[in-house]
């Protein structure tokens, strides 16, 4: 099954030390950074965080592993209280845009922003949706609340604790669309960069513009 996922990014991408150090010294600088940066240490210790049988084995593993390595209870989501990571994606580019527009708006409202521009990147790939718990026919309104994730987080934890690989569900931001909450990297079969966008926030709304090239 094809999926679409949108994440914050930079276009074009920029190396951390670009402009302040020579490229031949990047490896040394990354090694020094790893001494104090927990994000880098987590990426290096992926073997202790993600069991071998649950790992993604294709190209561009960092794009798949990121949400499983970097999560926080300060950033809960529909099916997680933040204590475990989830790879969220949608069945179409349009649905992925609507989902991320909603969450971006909530962020700007919470931080009292008046205007902002965010660069976003679309990722596409294939996943095995047969591994996911399918609740697309469920009529439980609590699981599909547009604002209260209490019930859905409890359900997500139950699926996670039972060894489940994730959840397939209806989007609440775009009619007749599906979303996927992936709990294990192995569900993803391939992934690649697709295109970039600008999310332009102003006057309480977000305008989406596509980059022609990056």
Image (spheres, helix red, strand yellow):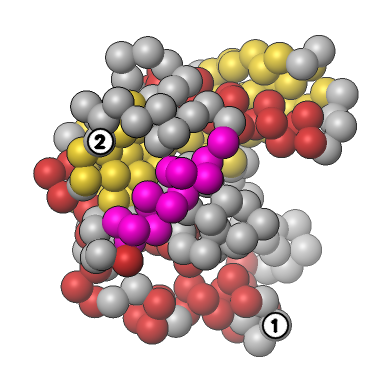
Q: Position of residue 106 (x, y in %)?
A: 69, 31
- Point out the stretch of residues depicted in magenta: 148-160
Q: Mark 1: which secondary structure? A: loop
The disc label shown at residue 145, or none = none
> 27 or 119: nearer the eye?
119
Q: Position of residue 122 (x, y in %)?
A: 44, 33
Q: CA distance from mark 1 to mark 2?
A: 42 Å
The disc label shown at residue 135, or none = 2
Which residue occupies 73% across, 68% down? 21
Magenta: main secondary structure equals: helix
Q: Residues within 10 Å of mark 1 (few under 14, many from 20)?
A: few
Query: Would you name the residue on which mark 1 appears?
Result: 36
Tell whether position 161 is magenta. Answer: no
Image quadrant assignment for residue 130 = top left
Label 1 with label 2: CB-CB less than 8 Å: no
> 209 or 90: nearer the eye?
90
């Amino acid at each position: 099954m094809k999926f679409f996922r949108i994440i914050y990014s930079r276009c074009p991408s920029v190396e951390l030390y670009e402009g302040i150090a020579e490229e031949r010294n990047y490896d040394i600088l990354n090694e020094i950074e790893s001494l104090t940066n927990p994000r880098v240490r987590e990426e290096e210790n992926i073997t202790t965080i993600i069991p071998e049988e649950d790992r993604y084995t294709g190209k561009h593993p960092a794009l798949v592993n990121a949400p499983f390595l970097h999560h926080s209870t300060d950033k809960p989501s529909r099916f997680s209280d933040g204590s475990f990571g989830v790879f969220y994606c949608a069945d179409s580019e349009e649905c992925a845009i609507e989902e991320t527009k909603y969450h971006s708006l909530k962020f700007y409202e919470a931080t009292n922003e008046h205007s902002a521009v965010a660069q976003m990147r679309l990722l596409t790939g294939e996943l095995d949706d047969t591994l996911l718990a399918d609740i697309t026919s469920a009529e439980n309104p609590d699981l599909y609340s547009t604002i209260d994730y209490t019930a859905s987080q409890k359900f997500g934890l139950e699926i996670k604790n039972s060894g489940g690989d994730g959840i397939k569900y209806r989007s609440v931001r775009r009619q007749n669309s599906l979303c996927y909450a992936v709990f294990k990297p192995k569900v993803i079969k391939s992934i690649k960069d697709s295109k970039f966008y600008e999310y332009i926030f102003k006057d309480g709304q977000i305008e989406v513009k596509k980059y022609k090239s990056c």
